[in-house]
Image (cartoon, rainbow, N blue to C red):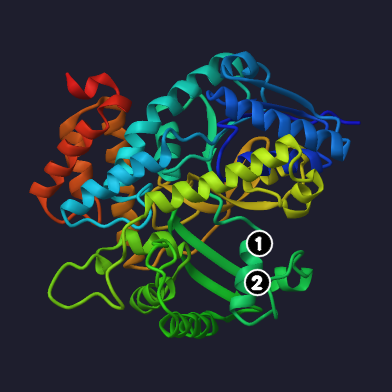
């Protein structure tokens, strides 16, 4: 039996990734003969995830080796893949970012990718990401580092710029093929429901291109058998927008609130469909509530950190129940699904030749963007890394927004590395939803002080 890869997971208790990697490690014929190394700095979290993985291993009879540590350096040697999925006091700091930005008229419905929230999360997370990269360069120089921490684009860009000796790319859970392709086949009226696996004849005829920066990406081409299906996609979006207006709005769920109504306006504006609905509406100024004319159907509502904290706590209680046997481990497998990172690792290691969306340098894929533009691109992947597939040019409008977002990320990365307040101020002023220089400066000063305990001391020299 061929030996599987050694996968090190930094942030084993991750809300999105922790359970998924255990499931895939036990289920995948390629991965189940490898090594799973779980790392978490919280001893209780690590113990729970180790128990869960041990139960999954026993139930599935998977022969993978299971190791764990609070110190990543203890388990990193010989790694083939290192996946970062950690977050320090996620809801606390996102809530802080959202609250202070809101004082100055900047509303974020997610608060971890763009706007002051995305900028300050980069300041908090990038120093640790780069320290991990240094450990990889020393202990596992041939490993692939896969960043699964938000803001994905900014942190992946930071690795590309400041850890060039480490092989890396970045991921988001949204653009996970084949599920995303199946979703759009359904939305365009090709299939009666999103079906996995996709019928080969559908897959071969379907030309779907989703382009942009992570969380700010657009369907710019959607053809089936050489015929554009964008009109059918718009019909479907318009129908969803009508349904949203017919039912009472849930204002507590900021990322889902009136998504299709905002999306329909952007679709008509740009001629391209905003794929990551819960995020794209946060990247543009149109729904902030600026100006004289009202934002329709209403300005976006701010991210509710308490709601997210409750969701995370509920999932963790369930995870602990699977780990201690209060819930049957069979139910864990019945509810499980392959996750984006380990699906990619499986394909890379096993030479399966599958295509995935990853965040990486453009390398000529999008002809009207720079080669080093850090974009989310459908790519071939093997053990030499991602090879972005040729794409169409970004349409005007989307092109300008994409360049502005990337400028913001570039400045944010440089600010995080240099701890230079002038560059940080410039990043905030460049951000697409900050529209006042005085407010940008006040947001910067208040957030630096509020988050002093988790920022490098160089910010306060």
Within 10 angstroms of label 2, few (less than 14), some, or many (20 or more) residues?
Answer: many
| Residue in the image at 73% along x and 49% along y | 353
Q: Secondary structure at mark 2?
A: strand
Q: Quadrant of the N terminus?
A: top right
Residue 123 is situated, as x and y percent measured from the top left of the image, at: 32, 33
Nearer the N terminus, badge 1 or badge 2?
Answer: 1
Query: In this image, 176 relative to 298: left or right?
Result: right
Residue at 15% from the left image edge and 34% from the top image edge = 422
Q: Position of residue 412 (x, y in %)?
A: 29, 39
Cα distance in 3D space between marks 1 and 2: 14 Å
Query: x, y (%) of residue 386?
Result: 59, 43
Residue located beneath label 1 in the image:
179
Between disc 1 and disc 2, the foreground one is: 1
Side of 145 where 243 appears, left or right = left
Mark number for residue 126? none
The residue lying at 22 percent from left, 46 percent from top is: 100
Residue 316 in sight in this render: yes
In the image, which disc is placed on residue 206? Answer: 2
The correct choice, above or below, for 202 with respect to 92 in the image is below
Q: Nearer the viewer, residue 157 or 275?
A: 275
Q: Nearer the viewer, residue 444 or 161?
A: 444
Count up the numbered dots: 2
Q: Position of residue 193 (x, y in %)?
A: 69, 76
């Amino acid at each position: 039996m061929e030996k599987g890869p050694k996968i090190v997971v930094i942030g084993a208790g991750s809300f999105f990734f922790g359970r998924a990697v255990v499931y895939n490690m036990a289920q995948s014929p390629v991965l189940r003969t490898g090594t799973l190394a779980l790392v978490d700095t919280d001893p209780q979290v690590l113990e729970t995830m180790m128990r869960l993985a041990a139960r999954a291993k026993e139930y599935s009879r998977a022969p993978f080796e299971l190791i764990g540590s609070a110190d990543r350096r203890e388990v990193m040697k010989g790694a083939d893949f290192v996946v970062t999925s950690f977050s320090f006091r996620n809801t606390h700091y996102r809530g802080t970012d959202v609250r202070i930005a809101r004082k100055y008229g900047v509303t974020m419905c997610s608060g971890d990718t763009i706007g002051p929230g995305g900028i300050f999360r980069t300041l908090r997370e990038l120093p640790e990401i780069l320290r991990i990269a240094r450990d990889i360069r020393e202990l596992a120089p041939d490993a692939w580092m896969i960043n699964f921490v938000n803001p994905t684009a900014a942190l992946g860009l930071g690795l590309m710029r400041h850890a060039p000796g480490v092989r890396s790319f970045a991921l988001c859970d949204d653009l996970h093929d084949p599920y995303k392709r199946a979703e759009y086949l359904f939305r365009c009226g090709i299939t009666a429901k999103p079906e996995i696996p996709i019928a080969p004849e559908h897959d071969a005829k379907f030309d779907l291109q989703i382009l942009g920066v992570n969380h700010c990406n657009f369907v710019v081409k959607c053809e089936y058998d050489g015929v554009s299906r964008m009109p059918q996609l718009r019909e479907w979006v318009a129908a969803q927008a009508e349904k949203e207006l017919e039912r009472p709005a849930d204002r507590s769920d900021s990322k889902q609130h009136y998504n299709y109504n905002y999306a329909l306006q952007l679709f008509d504006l740009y001629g391209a469909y905003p794929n990551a609905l819960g995020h794209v509406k946060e990247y543009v100024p149109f729904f902030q509530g600026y100006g004289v004319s009202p934002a329709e159907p209403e300005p976006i509502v701010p991210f509710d950190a308490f709601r997210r904290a409750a969701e995370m706590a509920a999932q963790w209680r369930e995870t602990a129940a699977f780990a201690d046997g209060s819930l049957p481990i069979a139910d864990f497998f019945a509810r499980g699904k392959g996750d984006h990172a380990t699906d990619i690792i499986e394909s890379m290691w096993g030479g399966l030749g599958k295509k995935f969306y990853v965040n990486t340098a453009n390398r000529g894929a999008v002809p009207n963007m720079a080669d080093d533009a850090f974009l989310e691109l459908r790519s071939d992947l093997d053990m030499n890394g991602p090879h972005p597939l040729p794409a169409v040019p970004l349409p005007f409008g989307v092109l300008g927004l994409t360049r502005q977002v990337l400028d913001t990320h570039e400045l944010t990365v440089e600010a995080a590395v240099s701890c230079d307040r002038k560059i940080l101020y410039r990043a905030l002023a460049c951000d697409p939803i900050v529209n006042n220089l005085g407010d940008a400066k006040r947001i910067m000063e208040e957030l630096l002080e509020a988050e002093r305990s988790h920022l490098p001391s160089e910010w306060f020299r």
